Amino acid sequence: MASRAFAAVPPLAKKDTYKVGFAQTESNNPWRLAQTASMQDEAKKRGWQLVYTDAAGSAAKQVSDVNSMIAQGVDLIFLAPREEVPLIPAIMAAKGAGIPVILLDRNVDQSLAKAGEDYVCFIGSNFIEEGQRVGDWLVANANGKTNIIELEGTTGSSPANDRKKGFDDVIAANPDFKILASQTGDFNRDLGRQVAETLLQAHPEANVIYAHNDEMAIGAISAVEAAGKVPGTDVLILSIDGGKEAVGLVVEGKIAAVVECNPRFGPKAFDTAVAYANGETIAPMIINPDQFYDATNAKELLPTAY
Ligand code: AHR
């Protein structure tokens, strides 16, 4: 890979309206649909033109989506990079073409591209903290359930890497707990179900499943039931995202706890672009605050979940 040029991020001219790109990574779950809707609603509200692409789960397609936005002469690109490394050339191509990039929700490898040098900033959740919050909840509420199966998100993506790190570090500091197996389910409901089924067969002593997103947690519920066990009683299921379906399952007792990952990016993303055009100093990482749901608050907060 070519070495990073240390010039500044291209500026954004001050205008009344903009043509901006939003390069989405995939659209196969409620979280992605909520994020896209938030971006589209905000563009409409402000009268900006939004060039929207869906990479359908392919980093290669997302690189070509960004190149196509560059060819169409967008003013700025919002990019939700599928994985940490393969999208670096797309960021560098936009920079070379004089188009600023704002990363949304997923980050890139910080040894290869940097906020304030190669792209404007990252806006999203603190994924390490999300994993830590799940781990801390488990340590405090396990009630003897200490044998864990971990369902990881998309390999090479920042949420999968960081949610694993945050959780695994908490578990490593609490020797009563053990991660029996950790395998990717690609943030996908059906793959999460299949992987959970296989791992539950290999590790019948498992009594905790930590899934890196709601989709895999919901798949894991089916796997636990297929194994003749009761979710929430025999096996604690823990998740991240906090969509309505998962929070409803907390109310039902099938999911024990969920850390929210807020998908409503539109207002903050567009405000940040305007602030950048106005020459304001932009923080390299703008972190979204995330809710936490368990049996103590899920019923009350369910109407506010996306
Ligand atoms: O990057 C955020 C993650 O990506 C969400 O947890 C997941 O559901 C989505 O696909």
Image (cartoon, rainbow, N blue to C red):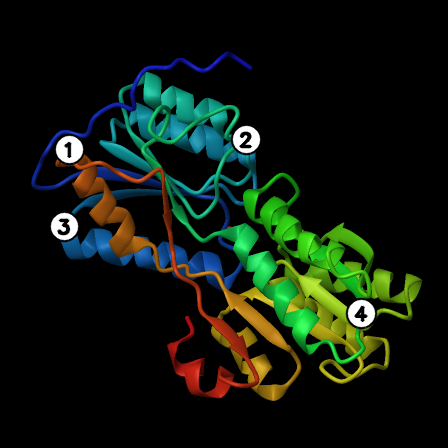
User: Which residue is disc 3 drawn over?
Assistant: 47
| Residues tagged 2 and 4 counted as in contact (Cβ below 8 A) | no
User: Which residue is disc 2 drawn over?
Assistant: 60
User: Which residue is disc 1 drawn over?
Assistant: 279
Closest to the camera, between mark 1 and mark 3, is 1
Vertical arrangement, residue 16 with respect to residue 218, above or below: above
User: Which residue is disc 4 drawn over?
Assistant: 146
Closest to the camera, between mark 4 and mark 1, is 4
Please say whether residue 113 is visible from this viewpoint.
Answer: yes
Residue 76 vs residue 58: left or right?
Answer: left
Label 2, label 3: how far apart the Cα atoms are: 31 Å
Q: Which of 292 and 189 is in front in this view?
A: 292
Marked residue nearer the N-terminal end (2 or 4): 2
Query: In the rendering, at what x and y percent does residue 130 appear?
Result: 54, 58
| Residues tagged 2 and 3 counted as in contact (Cβ below 8 A) | no
At mark 1, the secondary structure is: loop
Marked residue nearer the N-terminal end (1 or 3): 3
**Residue plotted at (68% across, 70% down):** 138
User: What amino acid type should be assigned to the residue bearing mark 3?
Assistant: Gly
